[in-house]
Image (spheres, rainbow, N blue to C red):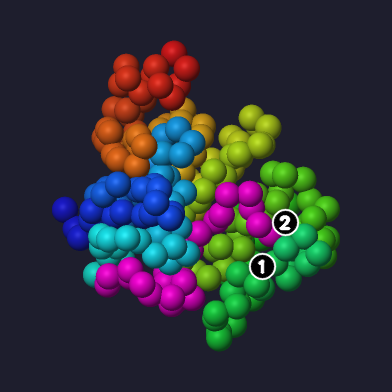
Amino acid sequence: MNEPILSIRDLKVNYGGIEAVKGISFDVQEGSIVTLIGANGAGKSSTLRAIAGLVKPASGRIVFRGDDIVGVDTSVIVRKGVTLVPEGRRIFPDLTVLENLRVGAYLRRDDISEDINWVYDLFPRLKDRSWQAGGTLSGGEQQMLAVARALMSRPKLIMMDEPSLGLAPLVVKGIFEIIREINAQGVTVLLIEQNANMALKTADYAYVLETGRIGLSGTGRALLADENVKRAYLGS
């Protein structure tokens, strides 16, 4: 097997005296979709925030394409090819769709017109609304914009924190189709998702986080069939 694009070793993240992540280790293979599932407070978002450089781990290693990125500035991590779609979308409501996309490419010094066309091909509804203010879009369209904005930095690894949160089932289905399409175009995906059923159906590999530790891991298909996972996360 090739070297993983992302390798986490004994990662610990603390907030004050609270240990949010308690020494987890996992790998993400290049070209794959990997999901982290678990209850609220299990440490999923803290893990992504540490990878993105938004919080400094208490200890452990985060190796992306051979480089340890612990302590590296977030802008440098983005330049290296890691981007995060945060929970709650965090688009700029007063900027147009096109302006939001340009913000996603703020670190680039090359021509971005090809990439704008690329994300408009992925999200035709955004093209139709390119001059509309982000805050006037529906929840599903705002989520599409958050993903498209993250893609404007041309990431090798895109991390998504709860992309389906608060969206109608039909919209959720569309978001997961887009995740598969992004992956098919060569972008590795690391996904946190409350909708464990959709996440496990989509993911090549999955890890279950339980209060800051990895409790289970396996292929998405294997965890879908696991009785403990069914009881705890799939409501059956």
Task: Residue 132: give x, y in percent of width and height.
Answer: 83, 60
- Label for residue 52? none
Amino acid type indicated by mark 1: Leu
- Disc 2 versus disc 1: distance between alpha carbons? 10 Å
Residue numbers of the magenta segment: 67-91
Residue toward you, 192 or 128: 192
223 over 192 or under it: above or below? above
Q: Are marks 2 and 1 in contact (CB under 8 Å)?
A: yes
**Residue 72 falls within the magenta-colored stretch:** yes
In the rendered image, the quadrant that contains the C terminus is: top left
Mark closest to the chain's N terminus, 2 or 1: 1
Residue at point 55% right, 79% down? 107
Q: Which residue is mark 1?
A: 101
User: Does any portion of residue 185 appear in the rendered image?
Assistant: no
Q: Is residue 34 left or right of residue 88?
A: left
Query: Badge 2 is on which residue?
Result: 126
